Amino acid sequence: MSEFDVKRTRADFLARVWRTVPVLKEPVLAILVCALVVLQIAHPRPWASRPGLVDWQTVSTLAGLLILTKAIELSGFLMWAAHRLVHHIHGERTLALLLVALAAALSTVLTNDVALFAVVPLVLSLHKLAPLPIRRLVIVIALAVNAGSVLTPLGNPQNLFLWQTSGVGFPAFVWALLPLCAALMALLGVVTFSMFRPKPLDLSGDVEAHPVDRVLCCVSVLAFAAFVALADAHHVGPALVVLAAAFLLWRREVVFRIDWLLLLIFVLMFIVLCSAAALPAIHDGIAHLGVGTPVRAYAAGAVLSQAISNVPAAIVLAEFSRDWRALAFGVSVGGFGVAIGSLANLIAVRLSGEKGMWMPFHIVSIPFWIVAMLIGWALV
């Protein structure tokens, strides 16, 4: 075999590996795998103990939501709703502001992740009817769910954790976080207004009928409400088993077509982030810096979230500071900036299905984080 044939054979083999190994085509997955290897080398621990680091309730909730939103999408309801919406709103800027407000409002009661599963698929259906700047829309919606979820204990996991550990009442928590939420939403309103023009929507592509499978739609919507209620009551495991089994027997294509790779990314993310948060160097560093004052607790939450995400940051910092308000401010602001700051960012980008989203996302989110840092510092 000639040298040329050998090189061609090697190239063909590498191409086959590239096509068949998903980790090589997913930057986030590749980074997580590399980080896990480095952590295992630097601080070895039994591989059998790694699954114990995963929040399986969150992963199960994500799996159930993926199934239900895929079912609603396949029913045709989202296309029908998008058709009705674009014929009542005629400009890109107005549409963007409406979607941001909707995402933020839903995130206060349904959590930021669930709000994304309601709004991003709707945006994708809108995009099929009228050409839209889909990347910019997904970016501002991701910012919106992070900003809106600041308001209530139900908005995101870190708020729920801090609310439970603080012992304050629901109204007191909302009142304490209201100034930050209002300021972040005002900032997001300015950003959204500047990113979109009052350009008329092109409805020339909306020429087909949009039938709805009413049985599938109604069952999915009712199941969605029941699943969220059961997940909130900490019965997500049995709920997921029943849900998956029912759709496998009735409409198996719903289960087969969900984003399984997103679930794998979330599992690895929990393992890597929780392993990093447990490193002695992080604990020693926080103890050395000191977070005894509100400003230091706030800054620690906003910065540490950029490295290990805001939920692990809240859990780690709660061991060093009892100022729950300053910590809530910090980890809330920490959800902006780099994508890993909030897992909702990852969900938004994955749901969009757009290639090359990470650079545009960070071009907007990092400056937003810097300004939000200054706002939070002034308010804390």
Image: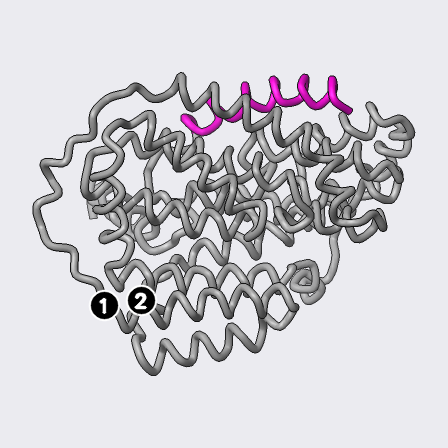
Q: Which residues are magenta?
A: 359-380
- Give the x, y percent position of residue 44: 74, 53
Residue in the picture at 27% in, 51% down: 81
Q: Is residue 115 above or below residue 57?
A: above
Q: Residues within 10 Å of mark 2 (few under 14, many from 20)?
A: many
The figure's colour scheme reads one colour
- Going 35% across and 49% down the picture, which residue do you hit? 121
Q: Is residue 105 left or right of residue 5?
A: right
Above or below residue 120? Residue 356 is above
- Tell me the residue at 90%/29% (across/down): 290
377 drawn magenta: yes
Q: Work out whether residue 41 can be spotted.
A: no
- Marks 1 and 2, how far apart at CA: 6 Å
Q: Which quarter of the rendered picture does the C terminus lie within? A: top right
- Quickly name the residue at label 2: 217
Contact? badges 1 and 2 (CB < 8 Å): yes
Question: Percent x, y for residue 53?
Answer: 69, 58
Q: Which residue is mark 1?
A: 213
Is 253 placed left or right of 273 in the picture? Answer: left
In terms of secondary structure, where does tag 2 sit? Answer: helix
Task: Kindly report the secondary structure that dominates the magenta region of the rendered protein.
Answer: helix
Residue 231, position as x, y percentages in the image: 59, 66
Q: Amino acid at mark 1?
A: Asp
In the picture, residue 330 is in which quadrant? top right
**Residue 343 covered by magenta stretch:** no
Mark 1 nearby-residue class (10 Å; few <14, some 14–19, many ≥20): few
Q: Amino acid at mark 2?
A: Cys
- Residue 269 is marked as none
Quadrant for residue 50, please give it.
bottom right
